[in-house]
Image: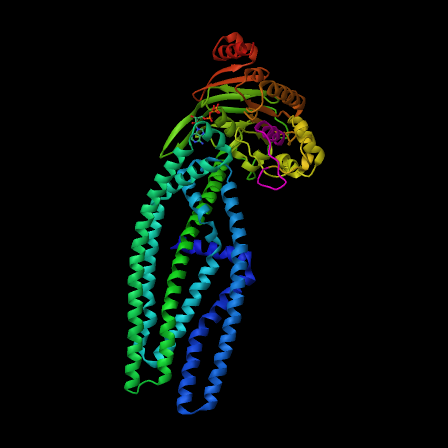
């Protein structure tokens, strides 16, 4: 219950924060328009009764009241609709931003691997439009409640038994909830299949996979799989829809019987002179309106509950993010030096001792089990050094790089930065001192300048700094050849957008990773796979020279590459195998050792001869 209230408050908060005036007016104008119909029916009753008793003044007064009520209802409906759209639009933007902050704002990456998390995020993505709808749903429920309340008062005035008419809304609401539950269960049961269906669609239509699909002739296979999955989803959802349709028929029957019963009762009252002709008009009007009101009540009630479900997911995400923050805070507190000050330790301006990994273990958790990927890694990265990580695919190189960046916390062991546990530092403070380029670099469809400048946000508008980073990334010629130079917009979905080759995108990602000038840690996790070996070698030679020049800050450069011509220039080479370090040393030392490195180096060198 507390969760439900919290979810409700969160979603109403989004609407009221986004458009406070319009949200308030939507609720108020909703009430005005809701009571106008029963009041109008009352006006009709007074007109009929006054006409029958020959009271012209009362009849004309009631006619005037009716006209005023109609005018008020029309005006309030217009403003209600205006408020509805305004709230919906503004709240949608606020909700989307909050969602982006929740998903992208957590310190680490571990949540992206949790199936539970992915499932919630996927569903919330599909239903995100509803996050903005709570003010609308509440206004709808308030409107229906106001109509039912005024109707009940008017009916009780004729005969208390007529109260059963508005009370018929209750079974209708219950049947509506059962119908909604049927559909919800079907959606939940088909959510995995639905994800697969979307993935197949994406594979079949994305330009990224076009070449492979054609080479392997996969289009038909994907189509057949898509058909099978779509049929499975449709079968399950159809079953739920038929069940819901049956319940809707029962609901309609109950409402119709209620209508007939109310009119019969008031006619009997007239026959026994306990009611007037005007009462018949009033009951016919109210009962006729009742089925529409009950229908609206069911729709808004269902909509309300649906949004509440999305709200619970939203609250779940919020809580997840808060738990993550708390866990990071607890880890920081635990890692803080004993007897240290309450404030977190400061990162040094320059590294003196370097970075040290002590018995670091880490595993990815999925499907209820953890698979260990790093097993007792002990490693010292000296200040100002260029360190290369090598090893077979899946050896754990990228995982180690991500741990150094603070994206994952070790399951066991510690990472020390100048002797202080990395976990003791706020994640954001450490990330501000890191830079890098990764295998899965982002293709940001902004201008070239922004694409590179986001690598150091405070200097994004500094054209010289961006040009220098583009030069360091070896992308000057690429950018010069673009129609508007560094102001060229990238991406084919924009009218003036230009697409780049894989290698050109990678050079921009490299330039982005080189925007920060004096980070304590710079990582290059195979960001040059699309470049030829000579270009990669030349670029890394320049990076290494720049890193060595900047040794006064003690910054460490870690690079991952499968090309030994690049790796050989590092000050320290680390060979990883199955999550363990098997060899460390300089190129010369490792060749002399005659182990895995020497063997692989010899193999690649022969290939180049
Ligand atoms: N997000 C993840 N969730 C679960 N397992 C993962 C994840 N990322 C990597 N792994 C697994 O961890 C192991 C190490 O992966 P990692 O990417 O660190 O290797 P790598 O040495 O960088 O490989 P490559 O040279 O292919 O890039 C692999 O077996 C991989 O399947």
The one nearer the camera, 182 or 404, is: 182
> Residue 535's quadrant in the figure?
top right
Instruction: Indicate the position of residue 351 as horizontal and vertical percent values.
Output: 61, 26
Q: Is residue 512 magenta?
A: yes
Residue 523, placed above or below residue 315: above
Residue 536, placed above or below residue 235: above
Instruction: Indicate the position of residue 432 as horizontal and vertical percent values.
Output: 60, 35
Q: Residue furthest bottom?
A: 54
Q: In which quarter of the image is ligand 1?
A: top left
The one nearer the camera, 240 or 16, is: 240
- Residue 118 shows up from this direction: yes
Q: Does the magenta stretch include residue 27?
A: no
**Residue 424 as seen in the image, left or right of residue 520:** left
> Residue 495's quadrant in the figure?
top right
Residue drawn 69% across and 34% down?
A: 485
Q: Quadrant of the N terminus?
A: bottom left
Q: Quadrant of the C terminus?
A: top right
Stretch of the chain drawn in magenta: 491-513
Q: Which residue lies furthest to the right in this view?
A: 464
Number of numbered discs visible in the structure rendering: 0
The one nearer the camera, 143 or 360, is: 143
Instruction: Indicate the position of residue 479 as horizontal and vertical percent values.
Output: 67, 31
- Residue 426 shows up from this direction: no
Residue 20, placed above or below residue 239: below
The one nearer the camera, 167 or 265, is: 265
């Amino acid at each position: 219950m507390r969760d439900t209230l919290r979810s409700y408050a969160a979603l109403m908060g989004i609407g009221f924060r986004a458009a406070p005036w319009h949200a308030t007016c939507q609720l108020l104008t909703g009430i005005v328009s809701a009571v106008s119909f029963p009041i109008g029916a009352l006006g009709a009753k007074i007109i009929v009764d006054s006409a029958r008793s020959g009271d012209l003044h009362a009849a004309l007064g009631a006619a005037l009241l009716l006209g005023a009520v109609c005018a008020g209802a029309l005006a309030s409906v217009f403003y209600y609709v205006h408020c509805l759209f305004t709230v919906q639009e503004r709240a949608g933007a606020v909700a989307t931003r909050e969602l982006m902050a929740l998903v992208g704002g957590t310190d680490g990456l571990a949540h992206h691997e949790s199936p539970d998390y992915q499932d919630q995020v996927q569903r919330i993505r599909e239903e995100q439009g509803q996050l903005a709808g709570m003010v609308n749903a509440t206004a709808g429920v308030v409107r229906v409640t106001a109509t039912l309340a005024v109707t009940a008062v008017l009916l009780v005035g004729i005969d208390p038994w007529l109260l059963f008419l508005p009370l018929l809304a209750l079974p209708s609401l219950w049947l509506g909830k059962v119908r909604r539950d049927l559909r919800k269960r079907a959606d939940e049961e088909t959510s995995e299949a639905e994800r697969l269906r979307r993935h197949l669609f994406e594979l079949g239509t994305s330009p990224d996979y076009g070449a492979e699909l054609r080479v392997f002739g996969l289009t038909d296979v994907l189509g057949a799989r898509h058909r099978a999955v779509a049929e499975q989803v449709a079968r399950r959802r159809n079953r739920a829809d038929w069940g819901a349709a049956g319940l809707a028929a029962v609901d309609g029957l109950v409402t119709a019987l209620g209508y007939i019963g109310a009119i019969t009762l008031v006619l009997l009252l007239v026959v026994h002179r306990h009611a007037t002709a005007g009462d018949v008009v009033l009951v016919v009007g109210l009962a006729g309106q009742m089925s529409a009101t009950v229908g609206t009540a069911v729709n808004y009630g269902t909509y309300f509950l649906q949004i509440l479900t999305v709200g619970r997911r939203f609250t779940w995400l919020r809580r997840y993010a808060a738990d993550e923050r708390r866990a990071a805070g607890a880890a920081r507190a635990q890692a803080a030096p004993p007897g240290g000050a309450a404030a977190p330790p400061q990162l040094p301006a320059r590294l003196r001792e370097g970075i040290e990994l002590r018995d670091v273990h880490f595993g990815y958790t999925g499907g209820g089990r953890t698979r260990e990927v790093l097993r007792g890694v002990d490693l010292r990265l000296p200040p100002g050094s260029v360190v290369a990580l090598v090893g077979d695919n899946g050896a754990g190189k990228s995982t180690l790089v991500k741990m150094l960046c603070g994206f994952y916390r070790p399951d066991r062991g510690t990472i020390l930065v100048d002797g202080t546990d990395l976990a003791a530092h706020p994640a954001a403070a450490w990330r501000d001192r890191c830079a890098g380029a990764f295998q899965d670099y982002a293709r940001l469809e902004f201008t070239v300048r922004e694409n590179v400048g986001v690598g150091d946000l405070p200097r994004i508008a500094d054209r010289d700094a961006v040009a220098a980073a583009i030069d360091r990334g070896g992308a000057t010629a690429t950018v010069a050849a673009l129609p508007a130079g560094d102001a060229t917009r990238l991406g084919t979905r924009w009218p003036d957008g230009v697409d780049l080759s894989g290698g050109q995108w990678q050079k921009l990602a490299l330039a982005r990773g080189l925007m920060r000038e004096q980070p304590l840690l710079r990582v290059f996790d195979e960001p040059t796979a699309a470049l030829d070996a000579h270009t990669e070698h030349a670029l890394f030679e320049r990076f290494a020279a720049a890193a060595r020049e900047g040794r006064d800050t003690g910054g460490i450069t870690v690079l991952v590459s499968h090309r030994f011509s690049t790796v050989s220039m590092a000050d320290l080479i680390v060979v990883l195998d199955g999550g363990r370090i098997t060899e460390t040393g300089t190129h010369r030392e490792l060749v002399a050792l005659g182990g895995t490195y020497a063997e692989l180096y010899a193999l690649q060198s022969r290939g180049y001869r």
